Image (cartoon, rainbow, N blue to C red):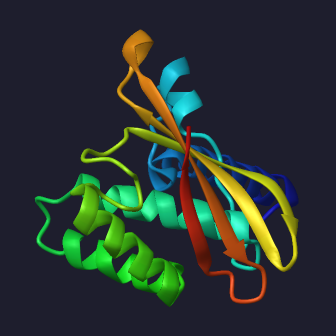
Amino acid sequence: MHSRTRTTLFAATGIAAALSLAAITPALAGTTSHTSAKSATAAASVQGDPRAVTTRVSDFYGSYIDSVWDLEDPTAAANAKALRKFYLSAAEQKKVAAFEAKEHADGILFAQNVPVKWKVEYTGSGAGHATSLVTLTWGDGSTAEVSKIKVQSDLQTRKITDLAPVN
């Protein structure tokens, strides 16, 4: 085979591979190549670190809200219970259960319904604990309400040791 023919063949193969990759990459990411500005914003990058307590608080609230949102799923209630057991200290689990028995509301969300959005921010650390602020958004648009929860985590165990609504 002549070197010019071989070069053309390699170039054509490379172009075909690049076009195939360009077509399949959005599908693998769960998006299409025709995204609107709104959906592009909603598909923001997310990352985490299991050693960082604020990331763990974020992971907990994201997973917990997903579970209580999908209560039609037969595994959702068991998943929410398992998440509490994994992420909360034993003492905090008891405190949450006491709140729920008294207030007849979810002791993680401090509410009877489920928020549509959540955000977690690191607010400081000291004495072996880190503090995060969880902001919950209830509804969309101009009528959306917001509530906040102060979350304290143990830096050694990374377990949530205290939840308190912020007034």
Q: Is residue 160 above or below residue 40?
A: below
Relative image position of residue 2 (x, y in whole percent): 82, 61
From the viewer's perspective, tell me whether residue 11 is left or right of residue 21: right
Relative image position of residue 153 (x, y in whole percent): 68, 73
Q: Which quadrant of the figure has residue 115?
A: top left
Name the quadrant of the N terminus. bottom right
85 or 14: which is nearer to us?
85
Relative image position of residue 49 (x, y in whole percent): 73, 72
34 or 128: which is nearer to us?
128
Residue located 33% across and 72% down the image: 98
Is there any visible trace of residue 48 in the rendered image? no
Residue located 38% across and 14% down the image: 143
147 or 144: which is nearer to us?
147
From the viewer's perspective, tell me whether residue 56 is left or right of residue 71: right
Residue located 39% across and 71% down the image: 96
Q: Which quadrant of the figure has residue 167?
A: top right
Residue located 85% across and 65% down the image: 125
Relative image position of residue 31 (x, y in whole percent): 46, 41
Is there any visible trace of residue 12 in the rendered image? yes
